[in-house]
Image: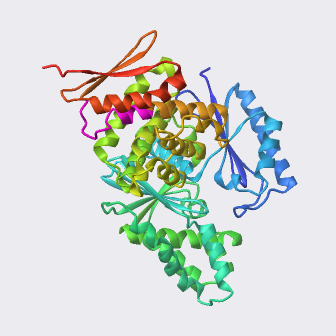
Amino acid sequence: MAKLQGVILLNTDAAALQIVDSRGRQIEHVKREYSEKNLPLASFSAEVMQRALSQLQRFQQLLRDYGVEDVRLYGSENLSKMLNAIYFVDQVENVTGLELLWLNANQENYYRQLALRVHDEKILNERYAFVLGVSSTRIDLSYFENNQFKFSQHSAIGPVRLTQSIRDMAAEITEIPDLIPEFIDSKLADFWHMLPPVQATDTIILLGADVLNQLFLNKKPKTTIHKSELQSLIHSFNQMNKQAIAEQYSIDLNDIWMVFMEAVLVVEVMSAVGASNLHMSSLTVLDGLVVKDNNAQNDIITAARGIADRYMVEEKHRELVLRYAWRLFDRLKRIHRLSARDRLLLGVAALTHDVGSFINSQKHYQYSEEILEGIDFHGLSTSEQRMIASIARYHSAETPDNALRSTQEFSPRQRMRIAKMAALLRLADALDDSRLQKISKLTVSIGTEKITVIGQSAADLQLEMYIFAQKAHFFEAVFGLPIVLKRQGKRS
């Protein structure tokens, strides 16, 4: 039998398991609810904890029956925000022996899109495509051109947060339904203002709107509806009582407000981008987690370029630093022993390490760290985002080399990875210190006593060689080998 993999995703109300083969083909898919849908930041009761743990043990028995040894366990962002999440994680790990990996909302959005690429790729082959991700506490709007990811932007205005805000306002304002669209528009004003240039499209793709999906999909994997159907639903909510709405649309009474909020939110986004059709899909985060991650680097690097553009990082320099950083990484693999994922993180850091210059070029590395700590990186975990910020901080020779040792936020292994990537980034940055793109080709030679980097250039490299030598001290401290830059005249 082909080697199988099992992936489990825990949310606040349910656990889901998929078993796939080495090609990513689904062998088994099981979902079990253990709690009613809760608002974020609620706590698990002891009873719900026990039901969740019991379900995980059933999943493990099923995995053993299939002979699955490769098992990954993930927890959703909403689950991570439960007040007693830390205790739940400890119990999960004690009972199952599995390490629980937290997903953030950026990753959830990314994995839904990855599933869309694999299972519904045709819809992305349109010349222009918007993908709207709706979770309980935020929306994510991503833009594709000819199936190529261009950017993703989010706003913390999900249907649950909207419902909470509206309930708070209801005590003082009577005409709530009429107010909601205006309230949403006010919250999205900055969102639209920061949107990069886009082309209009007739259809928006909707992912993650669970309650709205249940209403319109009716157990189908996908469907396309007209905007007028959502507007009709909204009109019914404004004109009918809850019991009548529940009966007409076969909605649970407890879900009516959520359906209404999701519908209003989606209509507002559709109106803003000029779309008249909505393509709805039942694809989930778990569907993306089991996909072979072939598009990760391209999409994540593209998103990093978008961040660099927003902070006006010089394009030629950042692209050259990216190229040099990856060249050094690839040629020095047996020295640094970092992973392919680290190569991706180094690329993101290479593109964004100078964002701090947007505030002040003096000590820009400090501002870079502060900015990057507050940015949500498309497809990266929270820990990886913090690592990127730290690499940006330590890419400068002005940062004390030993300061990283006192950083308690990271484990010793993470600190070592950061140090290695920062050392490589320092050298890549030094190779274009003049910002004149002098080096046309880079070669690396690993000797027994030192590493030699040869820059092919027709120009004078004295500045680059001087700065390289300064920044090489950190590399030698990290890797135990000196590294030098030499110039070679350009061949005719």
Q: Is residue 78 above or below residue 475?
A: below
Q: Which residues are magenta?
A: 425-439
Q: Is residue 172 above or below residue 290?
A: below
**Residue 268 pos. (x, y %):** 46, 72
Residue at figure coordinates x 44%, y 21% from the top left: 332
**Residue 216 pos. (x, y %):** 54, 63
- Which residue is nearer to you in this view: 188 or 318? 318
- Which residue is nearer to you in this view: 149 or 54? 149
Residue at figure coordinates x 22%, y 26% from the top left: 457
Is 286 left or right of 99, judged from the image as shown? left
Q: Is residue 21 above or below residue 447?
A: below
Is 459 left or right of 423, judged from the image as shown? left
In magenta stretch: residue 427: yes
**Residue 52 pos. (x, y %):** 79, 47
Residue 24 visible in the picture: no
- Which residue is nearer to you in this view: 13 or 89? 89
Which residue, as the protein is rendered here, is positioned at the far right? 46
> Quadrant of the rendered structure where residue 102 is?
top right
Residue 232 visible in the picture: yes
Quadrant, the C terminus: top left
Q: How is this picture coloured? A: rainbow
- Which residue is nearer to you in this view: 477 or 229? 477
* Mark count: 0
> Quadrant of the rendered structure where residue 38 is?
bottom right
In magenta stretch: residue 246: no
Which residue, as the protein is rendered here, is positioned at the far left? 492
**Residue 1 pos. (x, y %):** 62, 20
Magenta stretch: dominant secondary structure: loop
Q: Is residue 346 above or below residue 128?
A: above
